[in-house]
Image: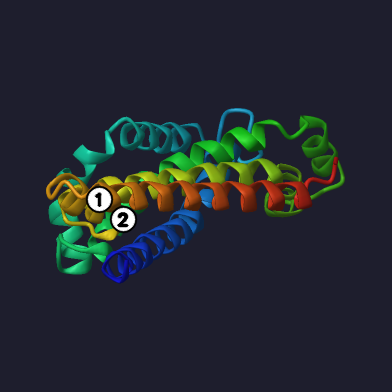
């Protein structure tokens, strides 16, 4: 039992480390990108058609690449950024790159659900684009954005397990090395249970936070 815990606890910490840091960085970059995609569209408050098309094409291109392929394809970039291609820190680079466009589209979709009349009213009152984004769009779309971020964090947990297949560390690496290669069923079951618990906790926290921010409820 003590041996199992000595294996599970470091792997759990590595997964939490990858998930938390990757989610924070991807959120900081992905949420503003979603606002840019929404506001620069043809009918947006700062319409920039060419900027929107270029950013949209890049976002769609990255989203279309399977994570396991992206993991390998950006090895030179990962080495350039963190100095290595093995370990939890290296695994965070493709996790962040994969999550940013996903978050951006989810944020864009959440902003589309904000009644257009609110934006038009703010424009009529002389609000600037920045004021509209921070005082109208963000508060109204916040529950949807939180739900989108929750989905993304769960996806990062799944992808972090996949990163374990190529030396990324974490619960995925532990499950492959001991559960699969050494046929240790106990480790495999424990790894799966921990991943399920993590996902459930993230979903529960996300749902609760979204309800607290929902002014309509």
Marks 1/2: CA distance? 6 Å
Q: Quadrant of the C terminus?
A: top right
Q: Position of residue 91 (x, y in %)?
A: 26, 57
**Residue at 85% from the left image edge and 40% from the top image edge:** 216
Residue 206 placement (x, y as % from top left): 63, 49
Depth check, front residue: 41 or 207 = 207
Measured along the vertical axis of the image, is residue 119 above or below residue 161? Answer: above
90 vs 121, nearest the viewer: 90
For the residue carrying disc 1, how many other residues have a C-alpha within 10 Å: few (<14), some (14-19), or many (20+)?
many
| Position of 78 relative to 6 (above/below) | above
Q: Residue at x 55, y 47 (%)?
A: 200
| Residue 68, above or below 91 | above
10 Å crowding of disc 2: few (<14), some (14-19), many (20+): many
Residue 61 position, x and y percent, is: 32, 32
In the depicted structure, whether residue 55 falls above or below residue 3 = above
Q: Mark 1 touching mark 2, by CB under 8 A? A: yes
Circle 2 sits in a helix, a strand or a loop, which is it? helix
| Foreground pick, 123 / 112 | 112
Q: How far across and down, in percent of the image, does residue 56 sit?
A: 43, 33
Q: Residue at x 57, y 37 (%)?
A: 108
Of the 4 image quadrants, the one containing the N terminus is bottom left
Element carrying mark 1: helix
Q: Is residue 197 left or right of residue 172?
A: right
Q: Nearer the viewer, residue 44 or 85?
A: 85
Which residue is under mark 2? 171
State the mark number for residue 175.
Answer: 1
């Amino acid at each position: 039992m003590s041996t199992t815990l000595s294996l599970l606890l470091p792997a759990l910490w590595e997964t939490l480390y990858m998930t938390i840091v990757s989610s924070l960085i991807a959120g900081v970059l992905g949420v503003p990108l979603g606002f840019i995609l929404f506001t620069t569209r043809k009918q947006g408050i700062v319409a920039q058609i060419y900027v929107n098309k270029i950013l949209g094409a890049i976002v769609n291109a990255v989203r279309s690449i399977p994570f396991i392929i992206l993991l390998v394809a950006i090895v030179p970039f990962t080495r350039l950024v963190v100095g290595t291609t093995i370990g939890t820190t290296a695994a965070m680079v493709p996790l962040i790159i994969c999550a940013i466009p996903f978050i951006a589209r989810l944020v864009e979709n959440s902003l589309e659900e904000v009644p257009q009349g609110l934006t038009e009213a703010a424009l009529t009152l002389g609000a600037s684009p920045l004021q509209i984004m921070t005082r109208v769009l963000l508060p109204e779309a916040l529950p949807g954005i939180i739900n989108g971020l929750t989905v993304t964090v769960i996806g990062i947990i799944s992808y972090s397990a996949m990163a374990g297949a190529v030396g990324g560390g974490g619960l995925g690496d532990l499950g492959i090395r001991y559960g699969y290669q050494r046929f240790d069923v106990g480790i495999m079951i424990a790894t799966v249970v921990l991943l399920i618990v993590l996902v459930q906790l993230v979903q529960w926290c996300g749902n609760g936070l979204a309800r607290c921010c929902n002014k309509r409820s």
